[in-house]
């Protein structure tokens, strides 16, 4: 059994929850789950035991109710009636967004709020925490002691605070994996990794790798393996979900720019001028974002070629599918006592794989590293 | 030194010849040459000693003259004045095309023509033959004795006859590598591979892997590694060079369809409906072809995503860059006495890698196999 | 009241029937109906009184039953239970397609079949016949007497025979409009136009103008009005409905090529090399076809620009929307006794506007001509 | 003869100057000049007599020298040696950009600078001033007296000051047309139009209509004429010329957003959610910008269709071609004493056609209005 608690009951969480239940019920195939049934843990081993949010229109509702409102179609598993959204810690993470939010620290103070949280997790025997809350503007802290100091003063962001709570929980009750699917640098914060290693917890992160970014990584690998010289890359993203709404605020937009840079040079071996950015919010696009991309390169004889790539991607399902793996791998990490963070896992699933300073590799390479770490072999390559 | 003879003095040959000389002169960087300076043989080791064609407007001309006519720009190396185009064997390979062609077998019979050819190669000490003649309609023969029988009756196609000549040359004078960059099944013909193994020659083939096909292979790998279910793939190619002109004839078009099928299922593990085809000839596009592609797939939760890919690719330079590797690898094969064919080389460079019956893999996997076979390691992965 | 009979109970017919009933019920807005509520006839004036097909799986079924099977979603108006598909005239129009078909002439001969048909139309007081049957290979006849001669010997195609029946009906009972939404040259056959004029009937045609063709016409107008020199145009279409399946047969494909050529030169004033073609059938695309297009042109100073256009279009609804206008205009034509054919109507709604020899104009120009002919003014331009 | 002075010796000016001379020399066809040879004034009637800039690296150089540096290829007409770039008025228009700039007002004060300018123009008998300087952040003034007041205090922007100078020149010496090809609201400033009408000058503007904007206008017209309901439009522009560099500064970017809004609603008759913006600067793209666009709409039956449009456009030549018309029309306006501004001209050539408050129409409609105003008929429509 893998007991999972969700932080941020948004669209990604919803697609994870509905999809997982439907998977367990054999109502859908496991498309979009990279490691499918290759892992020792099965889909039915995953149980979602809690979900946290701060949006007043969500707290207190069941996931079933929220799915009725926001998930397309009618096939909402009844089992989602059992998950009631609890109030999380806010710390102003929703500032500037058109939603009414309130955190439990606002009444009782941060200290009491933290203690309540980890008590809840203990009662539920939580193994894996999955962070899919709204993108927040934040910098790495770097030092474990500084993290502790700030945590007590309410001077961390919401994600940092949840991750800090995870270390407390691990120290006090049982090891835990914190899957950080959002851009906040946690697996990339040496302070958090140190704290985790000390306290028997694991952070997988940062920022789930879906959409155009992993595809670009592999496209660059394709270029590298032909020794094509990339002249420039431009990439635009536009969508209509609340994630894009949040990213439209400049201070949050910068979080994505950060996670997306770096890969170009690491994979190609040289810096290629690029303009890679989530750009705009356009409400009627909904969750199905539009990506447009140009790549220009020199071929043999210095002739100039061009690739143009357009994508229409259901944004939230893409990450939700990865979470089905990450929940299971999170548990495997605990079984193996692999505390701190795990580059081999992050390299495939994350846009900005921790630990800080690791080199970006193509997702092709990362996939092989991942299978190796897991001790799995690709069935296509078996004799 | 690697002595190379070209078969088919068309646009690909021209880009190979001009590019190679400019590379040797340090006039251009080695973009588009996958193995760059990683091989024991250097660019300056390659010497083009002969070129064969049957087009009356080319036979007897120097490559320099042809480059003046057909290569963009003014930077034509003077050294190309030394290569005079010789008359090859025709066997009707240009049938239906608007060019006046004549083969040397038309005067003196196939037997004498073959003997002349291999005598010329002997005098030039040819190591590597590169076949880049016009795509011809042809089926594999299968049996070495049948090949010999048909060769003597002029019942093989031009490519088959050149390859047969290579086996004669190898048997009589010295080992040789025949690089088959066109769709004719030679490395995929068990008869030819058998004949080669017996006679100390190597065929690398078939059909140089450039353009949308290798990219599609890697795109499918990307899909596979995320367990996305590909719903359909459509891909169109249109160009304005004489290769597209030839492919526009239905009996030749089918040659490309053949080399392109199969990869989808081998990589994905299931058959995905596809329509992948070179389609049209549009003269003003010249050598810069246009490729349009759609890929639809199911993501997690059976949501449908779409990729649209457009490419503008300089067709001939792409293959010419690969030939810079293949000439060198052709020589390495001889050094290693690796006769017959070499899957590890074909898998990366060819659309339909021989030997017959081998499984298609993504180019990413093929690249690793290739480096392994060559005993090279990717400098990015060195400590 | 406008009494409409449908010929060819396929996907276009279905979208017309379902859409029209839903329009009348105010269940959907009138998107895709160019003349919306600007015409003297209202949507509720249109009544579909008959539908003909030869597919054994359709004849005898109600349109409601067929809609349940083939129309997406659940909102099928119950009123469609009243339309039962009758057996039409086959004359081998389904040859080569994977459907079991049988025409009423097969039992009783063509003469009796024709008489039955026009008697049915008389009983139903049919005003407008809409031809949306499968694309058939056919050439114009040219001479009215030859048409009569061939009709009696069953030597016309199915569409020609239906159109001939329309002239008989008009001569004997009452004027009728025959809307020819398929590529068969009827409005472009001087013989049919002559026959119609003699017998008080009107043919609007040929080949409904939807998808990429009208868009290309307007794009070319845009180029012309900037004096850009179009260098080349390539356009591919691929889809997964039975229309694409039929067009995949080479002799039918040629029908579309014909209707699409000509426009380039007429609009630009010079011939621009082009490759415009419906190309492929790919079943999972269903009715939502994929169009890819490139246009290259010279700008000021002979600099070369490029446009790339991709479309995903629901094929059948696009034509169905036009039919809502054409049924009403068909009736207006009769009110005005405008027999023969009407260029001003065809120029906007048809790919190959009759009469034969008329010049192609951009759809912008055609729209103005259409409004003029109808005596309507664009509300945006009113004071 | 039409004597033209250029304001802003950038890339657009260069393409206009080189192209015009080459046109006069019959070295290039007149592609990209919408009205070609249909106007009473010929290309050879246009003479460029002066050019102003404030960039220290340009002032004092001949246009020939600048063309050698910045115009592709070698065909620079020698006649351009006659045009020496004069120092213009700066007023801080280059603030924040990485160029060293200095205006003649910086030494001698605004008043003297203005007087010098109009004296120069008088000596050269200038008929038409063409403003193609760097996009500046600016708001309309509205009142002629306020304009005069601010002019004397150096409180107008550079463009406004040049336009003000034009009114002084017209009042004192001779009527003049000021072509405002940049986003600054001049033809849209009722104050400037009033001043012009009083003083016998004409402003054509604002913001030359090239690239994706006019194409979008006509695409929307195409949608309107089919009653398709546009759901959303997103459009990105990225380029590598100094215009994009300037537009990358947020306060300048807003100038383009302004000129591009409004057209959607005016043409469609309803507001469609849109995100239309010049977005990024990517140096290696140079003058050949990349535009990506998505348009989603409802077809008949509320089925959702999508268009994806990609463009590669040589940015500066596109505007330069229009200037060949605007110089000639500027002169025709003077011949006709059509002072103030001319909507019929602006509607076709400008993104934000003056006077303020005029309705956007499709370019197709605008072209007809333009021909009407000029008394020209489209040769395609002649009998
Ligand atoms: N493909 C993808 O969708 C993808 C990929 C990578 C990363 N991500 C990241 O995943 C996150 C979630 O995306 P989404 O589309 O579900 O967004 P969303 O806006 O639908 O959901 C975010 C939820 O987090 C809640 N929240 C905000 N602050 C909180 C707090 N302090 N405590 C608890 N809950 C809080 C919000 O109320 C909201 O319900 C985003 O940060 C996004 O950047 C998404
Ligand atoms: N990217 C690529 O361009 C690419 C990729 C894979 C394969 N290929 C294959 O490479 C080949 C060459 O392409 P290309 O663009 O240079 O074509 P091309 O038409 O420019 O050149 C082919 C040349 O072969 C000559 N030829 C024909 N029959 C001959 C014979 N019997 N003996 C000697 N010469 C003969 C022709 O006269 C012509 O000069 C084609 O078969 C093509 O399918 C090209
Ligand atoms: N946007 C568009 O869909 C579009 C645009 C222009 C023209 N068209 C034309 O409209 C026609 C219909 O398209 P569709 O998508 O509905 O095709 P479809 O294949 O779904 O339907 C055609 C129907 O015609 C029937 N039919 C064939 N022969 C017949 C005969 N002799 N008598 C009576 N019925 C007969 C078939 O059984 C079938 O039910 C095609 O010819 C197509 O080329 C369609
Ligand atoms: N297709 C197009 O290129 C297009 C279309 C519409 C509008 N425009 C507008 O045209 C203008 C010119 O574009 P460009 O590509 O040539 O840009 P550019 O940057 O190449 O040239 C602008 C020139 O103006 C000069 N300048 C700046 N301030 C000046 C001043 N106060 N007095 C005199 N000169 C001054 C600069 O030094 C520079 O040389 C821009 O405002 C652009 O927005 C261009
Ligand atoms: Mg998201
Ligand atoms: Mg080729
Ligand atoms: Mg159809
Ligand atoms: Mg510009």
Image (spheres, coloured by chain):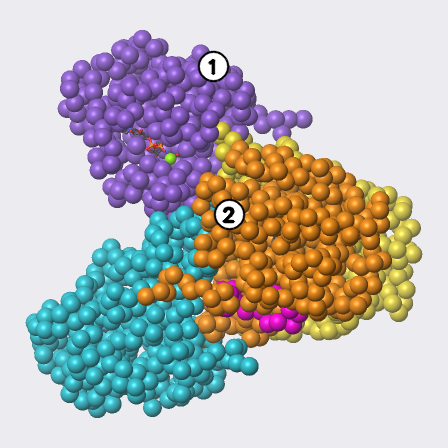
Chain colours: A cyan, B orange, C yellow, D purple
Residue at image point 33% right, 36% down = D242
Label 2 marks which chain's residue?
Answer: B
Label 1 marks which chain's residue?
Answer: D
Residue at image point 71% right, 73% down = C61
- Depth check: A207 or B131 in front? B131
Cα distance in 3D space between marks 2 and 1: 58 Å
Q: Nearer the viewer, mark 2 or mark 1?
A: 2
Label annotation for residue D45: 1
Q: What residue range appears in magenta?
A: B352-370
| Residue C25 % position (x, y) | 54, 64
Where does label 2 land, which residue?
B44
Neighbours of disc 2 within 10 Å: few (<14), some (14-19), many (20+): few
Residue B41 in view, yes or no: yes
**Quadrant holding the N terminus of chain D:** top left
Q: Is residue D307 above or below residue C271?
A: below
Residue at image point 50% right, 49% down = B43
């Amino acid at each position: 059994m893998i007991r999972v608690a969700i932080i941020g009951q948004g669209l990604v969480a919803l697609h994870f929850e509905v999809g997982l239940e439907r998977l367990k019920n054999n109502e859908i195939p496991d498309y979009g789950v990279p490691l499918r049934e290759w892992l020792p843990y099965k889909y039915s081993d995953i149980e979602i035991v809690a979900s946290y949010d701060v949006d007043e229109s969500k707290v207190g509702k069941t996931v079933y109710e929220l799915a009725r409102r926001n998930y397309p179609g009618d096939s909402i598993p009844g089992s989602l009636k059992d998950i009631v959204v609890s109030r999380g810690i806010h710390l102003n993470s929703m500032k500037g967004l058109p939603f009414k939010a309130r955190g439990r620290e606002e009444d009782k103070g941060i200290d009491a709020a933290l203690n309540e949280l980890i008590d809840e997790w203990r009662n539920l025997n939580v193994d894996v925490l999955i962070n899919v809350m709204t993108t927040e503007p934040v910098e790495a802290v770097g030092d474990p002691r500084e993290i502790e100091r700030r945590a007590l003063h309410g001077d961390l962001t919401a994600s940092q605070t949840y991750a800090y709570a995870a270390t407390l929980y691990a120290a006090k009750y049982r090891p835990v994996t914190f899957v950080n699917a959002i851009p906040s640098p946690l697996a990339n914060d040496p302070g958090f990794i140190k704290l985790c290693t000390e306290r028997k917890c694991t952070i997988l992160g940062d920022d789930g790798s879906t959409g155009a970014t992993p595809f670009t990584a592999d496209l660059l690998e394709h270029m590298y393996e032909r020794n094509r010289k990339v002249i420039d890359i431009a990439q635009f993203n536009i969508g209509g979900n609340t994630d894009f709404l949040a990213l439209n605020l400049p201070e949050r937009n910068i979080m994505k720019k950060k996670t997306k840079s770096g890969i170009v040079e690491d994979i190609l071996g040289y810096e290629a001028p690029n303009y890679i950015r989530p750009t705009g919010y356009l409400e009627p696009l909904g969750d199905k974002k539009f990506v447009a991309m140009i790549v220009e390169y020199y071929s043999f004889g210095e002739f100039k070629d061009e690739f143009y790539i357009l994508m229409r991607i259901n944004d939230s399902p893409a990450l939700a599918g990865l979470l089905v793996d990450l929940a299971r791998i999170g548990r495997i990490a605990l079984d193996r006592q692999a505390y701190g963070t795990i580059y081999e896992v992050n390299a495939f699933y994350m846009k900005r794989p921790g630990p800080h300073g690791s080199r970006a590799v193509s997702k092709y390479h990362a996939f092989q590293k991942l299978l190796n770490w897991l001790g799995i072999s690709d069935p296509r390559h078996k004799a």
